[in-house]
């Protein structure tokens, strides 16, 4: 009897692009590689050290989307678009010497969702049209391609509402539940699923409170917003709120904390991109973090909030120069 393949997918957790790119990969793999495959999803959090252990790669096929590279010989698929995709030069060399034609990297893409879709279409004949809405919104959300800060903060679209729930759901991540739904349903249906709908109202209230809190906490100096909410449950708050409150700001540096990590977020104003000339990924990499030239982050252990606060102040001072 034919034994369907087990496919393990690692993805950037609590991130709409991570979930959306996993959904695109799932649909592509089922349509073009193996229609009977069984999928298992593992969310990953960016850390300064190697986040993978060899025993994690337990699938017949193991894929990473929207997350750092691994040199494991068990890794069979990889897609990423972050500048900081490789922890070491040796990792990059390993990727460049890979000839499987199943590992792909392009930091010019604004989202991994569109990157996976385009590669799957160009190289494997995948049809993007049935999930065009998912691909479109993955690129808008991860690429910060909103028309205005007001639109970005309003969270009025099904995609942005799903993103709010993915990024802020209390307890365990719900992305592994939503990924197969996003692969097979329109976003207008996904947002109505109980797992989303039951969380949406309280999370929208939390979102509204976060605007009031950041209005009080943000300090704007020399074009740089700075805030520290590490004493509050505000990790994952909307990254565009600072530019709604202070549209003249070019950069934002924030400190937050959750049960799994302390975090320094570094971002630039998408509506003043011509002034945001600093490479934020390069700055974050100096502290063990990474990301994109326009937005990046640095993760610390949960008990390292003082260190995160220190680093955030250093980064804010550098950006003010």
Image: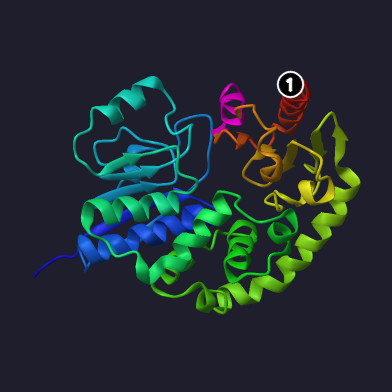
Q: Which residues are magenta?
A: 280-290
Residue at point 28% right, 64% down?
A: 38
| Of the pair 99 and 246, the residue shown nearer to us | 246
Is-magenta flag for residue 281? yes
- Which residue in the structure is indicated by mark 1? 318
Q: How is the image coloured?
A: rainbow
Q: Position of residue 68 (x, y in %)?
A: 43, 37
Is-magenta flag for residue 240? no
Residue at point 85% right, 42% down?
A: 218
Residue at point 75% right, 38% down?
A: 254
Locate residue 88: give its quadrant: top left
Q: Secondary structure at mark 1?
A: helix
Q: Residue furthest right?
A: 216
Disc 1 crowd, CA 10 A, few/some/many (<14, 14-19, 20+): few
Q: Position of residue 230 (x, y in %)?
A: 77, 42
| Of the pair 54 and 185, the residue shown nearer to us | 185
Q: Residue furthest left?
A: 1
Left or right, residue 203 beside residue 175 = right
């Amino acid at each position: 009897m034919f034994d369907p393949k087990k496919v393990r997918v690692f993805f950037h957790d609590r991130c709409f692009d991570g979930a959306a790119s996993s959904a695109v990969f799932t649909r592509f793999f089922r349509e073009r590689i193996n229609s009977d495959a069984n999928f298992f999803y593992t969310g990953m959090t960016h850390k300064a050290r190697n986040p993978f252990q060899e025993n994690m790669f337990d699938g017949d096929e193991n894929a990473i989307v929207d997350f750092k590279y691994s040199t494991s010989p068990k890794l069979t698929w990889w897609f990423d678009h972050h500048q900081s995709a490789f922890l070491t030069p040796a990792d990059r060399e390993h990727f460049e010497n890979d000839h499987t034609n199943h590992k792909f990297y392009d930091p010019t893409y604004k989202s991994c969702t569109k990157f996976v879709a385009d590669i799957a279409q160009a190289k494997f004949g995948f049809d993007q049209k049935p999930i065009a809405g998912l691909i479109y919104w993955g690129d808008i959300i991860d690429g910060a391609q909103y028309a205005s800060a007001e639109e970005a903060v309003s969270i009025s679209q099904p995609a942005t509402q799903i993103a709010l729930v993915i990024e802020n759901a209390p307890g365990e991540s719900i992305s592994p539940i939503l990924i197969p739904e996003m692969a097979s349903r329109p976003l207008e249906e996904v947002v109505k699923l109980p797992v989303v709908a039951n969380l949406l109202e309280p999370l929208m209230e939390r979102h509204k409170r976060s605007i009031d809190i950041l209005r009080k906490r943000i300090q704007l100096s020399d074009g740089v917003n700075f805030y520290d909410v590490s004493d509050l449950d505000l990790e994952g708050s909307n990254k565009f709120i600072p530019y709604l409150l202070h549209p003249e700001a070019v950069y934002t540096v924030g400190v937050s904390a959750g049960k799994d990590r302390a975090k320094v977020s570094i971002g630039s104003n998408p509506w003043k991109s011509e002034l945001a000339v600093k490479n934020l990924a390069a700055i974050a990499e100096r502290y063990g973090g990474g990301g994109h030239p326009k937005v990046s982050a640095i993760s610390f252990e949960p008990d390292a909030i003082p260190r995160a606060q220190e680093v955030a102040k250093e980064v804010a001072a550098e950006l003010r120069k």
